[in-house]
Image (tube, rainbow, N blue to C red):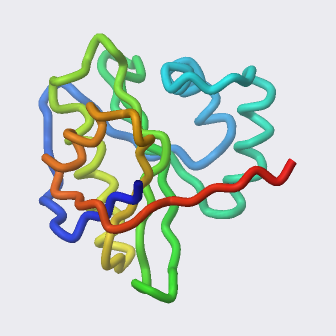
Amino acid sequence: MLFISNEMNSTASATNYITRELATVTEMKDTYELLKQLGYDYDLDTYMNYLEDMIPKGYKQMVVLENDRYIGVAGFWLSTKLFCGPYVELDNVVVAASHRSKGIGHLLCNVVEEKARQYGCNIAVLDAYVHNERAHQFYFREGYIIRGFHFLKKLA
């Protein structure tokens, strides 16, 4: 499913949390442990290799820290498409299990969406697995709508 946000809220603030944008492989290395919660089946070396390929194509991460510990991460891409012009795509949004339902996901979305506004983006898009109903409810609360389907075909 493709979620699109046309209603982007102003940047959230939380007194105990720090947000930081990461743009290099070295900076992103430590998000691996948090991203493993998504269930991807690859090791740290593979993650680093993927980042080496993704970063030159515009991939970045926004993280939320509490006491110098990553408790939330959202990958994102700022780009342009013919159907909408400039847009942001959220990619692999995850909050530490110990910090869910505490506003961290909301904070991540708001900070990335504000950055996208500054870039001139018209919309935000993201994919969520069909079976991930908890994520669907979260994104609906964030103002996203289901606009289409994300098709995929294995090539190898």
Above or below 119: residue 115: above
**Figure disc tally:** 0
Q: Position of residue 51 (x, y in %)?
A: 70, 43
Task: Name the foreground residue: 111 vs 83.
Answer: 83
Q: Position of residue 72 (x, y in %)?
A: 37, 29
Above or below 2: residue 141: above
Above or below 156: residue 46: above
Left or right: where 107 falls relative to 28: left
Left or right: where 154 falls relative to 30: right
User: Which of the 4 image quarters holds residue 47?
Assistant: top right
Task: Name the foreground residue: 116 vs 82.
Answer: 82
The extreme top residue here reads 98
Residue at figure coordinates x 41%, y 23% from the top left: 70
Residue at figure coordinates x 75%, y 20% from the top left: 43
Left or right: where 80 falls relative to 13: right
Q: Position of residue 46 (x, y in %)?
A: 79, 30
Residue at figure coordinates x 23%, y 52% from the top left: 110
Q: Quadrant of the N terminus?
A: bottom left
Residue at figure coordinates x 41%, y 42% from the top left: 130
User: Which of the 4 image quarters holds residue 116?
Assistant: bottom left
Q: Position of residue 133 (x, y in %)?
A: 29, 34
